[in-house]
Structure formats: structure tokens, C-alpha cells
């Protein structure tokens, strides 16, 4: 779960950087905390690949990066399903 959450943060930050690069808008490097924040207007809500928790593929995220997220998310879901069946 920690790895998936970290990947979500990295994907959101990469998306934010891609959007800023496209628009030519930059932030003051001294004000950057290193943590990505997401403006809901920057999310591509029509993108395929949302998981049940509502995390959707952010705009500007490459196919390979998204595939890594999907693999980690799928492994977590499979583990959770088997864990619940075993200990429920």
C-alpha cells in the first residue's frame, strides 16, 4: 500500500510538471516543498484506467509509468483478495 501511494504521488507530481512545462508556467524553486499538489482541473477524468479508490491516470503521464502503477496496483489487489479470503 505504501508503494502504491508513493507511485500515486510521483505520478501526480510528474503530471503537474508536464502541465507546467506545456503552459510555460514555473514555480519559484525556493517555494517548492518537493511534494506535489494536484489541482482537480488538471485531472483528465475521461482517461481509462481508474481503480476502485478513484485514482485515475493524470494528464501527461507516460504509458510506461502508468503500466508500472497498474502492475503494482494489481499485485496489491491480488494480495488483498487472497489475504482476506485466508483470514476472514
Image: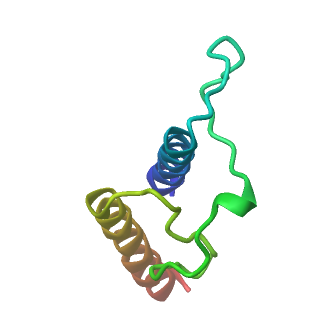
On the image, the x and y values in percent for residue 87 come to 51, 81
Residue in the image at 51% along x and 62% along y: 59
Residue at 36% x, 70% y: name it. 70
Residue in the picture at 60% in, 26% down: 34
Q: Is residue 31 left or right of residue 65?
A: right
| Quadrant of the image containing the C terminus | bottom right
Looking at the image, residue 32 lies above or below residue 70 = above
Residue 81 left/right relative to 5? left
- Quarter of the image where one finds residue 20: top right
Residue at image position (53%, 62%) is: 58
Across and down, in percent, residue 47 comes to: 50, 78
Q: Position of residue 62 (x, y in %)?
A: 34, 58
Horizontal side, residue 41 vs residue 19: left or right = right
Pick out the residue farthest to the top. 30
Q: Between residues 20 and 31, which one lies in front from this camera angle?
A: 20
In this rendering, is residue 84 above or below 39? below
| Spot occupied by residue 61 in the image (x, y as percentages of width and height) | 41, 57
**In this figure, what is the number of numbered marks?**
0
Whether 61 is drawn above or below 67: the answer is above
Residue that extends furthest to the front in the rendered view of this protein: 24
Q: How is the image coloured?
A: rainbow
Up/down of 11 relative to 86, above or below: above
Q: From the viewer's perspective, is 48 left or right of 19?
A: left
Q: Nearer the viewer, residue 88 or 33?
A: 33
Amino acid at each position: 500500500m505504501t508503494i502504491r501511494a508513493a507511485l500515486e504521488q510521483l505520478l501526480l507530481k510528474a503530471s503537474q510538471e508536464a502541465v507546467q512545462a506545456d503552459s510555460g508556467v514555473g514555480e519559484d524553486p525556493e517555494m517548492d516543498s518537493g511534494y506535489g499538489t494536484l489541482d482537480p482541473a488538471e485531472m483528465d477524468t475521461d482517461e481509462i484506467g481508474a481503480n476502485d479508490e478513484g485514482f485515475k491516470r493524470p494528464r501527461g503521464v507516460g504509458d510506461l509509468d502508468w503500466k508500472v502503477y497498474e502492475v503494482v496496483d494489481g499485485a496489491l489487489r491480488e494480495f488483498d483478495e487472497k489475504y482476506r479470503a485466508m483470514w476472514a
